[in-house]
Amino acid sequence: MYENEIYSGDRTGDHTTGTYQSYQDRASGGGYGNIPKEPEKKKHTGGFGKKLLLCACLGLCFGLFGGLGLYAVQQVTDMYNPPREESSAQGAVQPTPAPVADVKLTTTDGTRVVSSDVSDMVEEVMPAMVSIVKDYTETSSFWGRTYSEDKQGSGSGIIVAQGDTELILVTNHHVVDGADKLTVIFIDGSTAQAQIKGSDADMDLAVIAIPMDSLEEKTKNAIAVARLGDSETLRLGEQVVAIGNALGYGQSVSGGWVSALNREVTYTDGTSGEFIQTDAAINPGNSGGALVNMNGEVVGINSSKIGGVNIDGIGFAIPISEARPIIENLMTKETRFKVAEGETGYMGISLQTVTQEFAYMYGVPEGILITDIEEGSAADKGGMLSGDIITRFEGEKIVSYEDLQEVLQYYGPGANVTVVVKRLLQGSYQDVELELTLGERP
């Protein structure tokens, strides 16, 4: 047989009859029905194209609905967020600037300023600021013996007026209290000696004066008079700058904010006052310096004594609106010069200091208790009585014998002085003002 041929016929014994057919012919028609036909292959007519068309339609629908959704979101966004302005130079959309960290400042004329650079303002006001060096004598007692030691203290001051004969400065009372000599250092480094015109211990204010003829011409051209503002217009969070002779190193600047207004502070002697609180650094030596607003106006007089010096981040200043009338009053007083030692005026009294403990125990005011009065003395002629308690001498607060001795150094025989005493009248102590003409010390 040949390959691919199948024999069909009969076999009888050794004889065979029949014909040969190819495998293909048998499979296609006749012959052995038990031989399976080769399965026909299915024809794919357009199935893939239909799927492709369906995907395209779905994608188109998704894109259409997605676009409509984005358009709706954009319209709502535009309603609440107006479109940003485009730059005229580049045509690009500029981002909205972030909020500036600087504070808005309110000036006396109602305008608002936003600034973080205060260098121009400081340069303008610095000629009105001075440093003050106080020479004083500290006495102490040990085992019945008294010792004296010469010391120096530092503070600050503000030039508030300039006349034909005097340059007037304001500072704290405690800066000049007990001074043997006051040296003022100006912006150009020159120095001059100052004298006390008057002080108010309760408000911790003092006015000092320098003769104009003691200043060099270059110093007169370098200095300036400070502009006083209105502390009543200050607002919480307003930016302020403290200027002063911090730690005695010379003029320095510290910045901060108005932390509180009308902050009540009580002193160790029981008296109290209302002050500006700020977080600008106010250290020893800053006392008597200026608290300045962004217009370069003095809105407060710094004092490191208020509240203590060991508090971090809290400083106090005397509001200028409260200090102004006191300053104007002290400016009218006659400039005081110390008289020669041993030539101070004489009152003719015996006295005893009323301490805080004594005052608390017996219910009497603090001051100097008059225990005896010499007949015909200045005190006798002026109407003083035994039992009176001296509380003020020429406006100066008197709480001890040392206070009276300090103020008497500026008044010689023949000086007319005003003395305030507490006198027991109708069961309570009342203020009585007396006029005395000091006599000569015997």
Image (cartoon, rainbow, N blue to C red):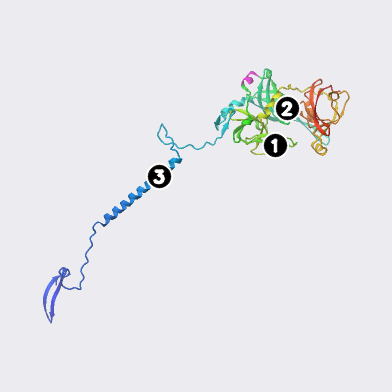
Question: What amino acid does circle 3 point to?
Answer: Ala
> Which residue occupies the foreground of this view, 143 or 309?
309
Closer mark to the observer between disc 2 and disc 3: 3
Whether residue 163 is visible to the viewer of this picture, yes or no, is yes
Q: Secondary structure at mark 3?
A: helix
Density class for disc 1 (Cα within 10 Å; few <14, some 14-19, many ≥20) is some
The kind of residue tagged 1 is Val
Specify which label sits upstream in the sequence, 1 or 3.
3
Q: Is residue 199 above or below residue 65?
A: above
What residue is disc 1 on? 265
Q: Quadrant of residue 377?
A: top right
Give the side of residue 327 with respect to residue 103, left or right. right
Label 3 environment density (alpha carbons within 10 Å; few <14, some 14–19, many ≥20): few
| Residue in the picture at 59% in, 25% down | 124
- Residue that carries the numbered disc 2 in the rendered image: 199
Q: Secondary structure at mark 2?
A: strand
Q: Is 11 displayed left or right of 59 in the figure?
A: left
Front of the two marks 2 and 1: 1
In 3D space, how far apart are the residues under numbered discs 1 and 3 (Cα atoms)? 61 Å
Magenta stretch encompasses residue 403: no
Give me the C-alpha separation between circle 2 and circle 3: 75 Å
User: Which image quadrant is residue 4 in?
Assistant: bottom left
Magenta residue span = 216-221
Please give the label number shown on residue 72.
3
Q: Amino acid at mark 2?
A: Ser
Could you tell me which residue is drawn at 33 percent across and 49 percent down?
A: 60
Residue 178's x, y, as percent?
Answer: 75, 29
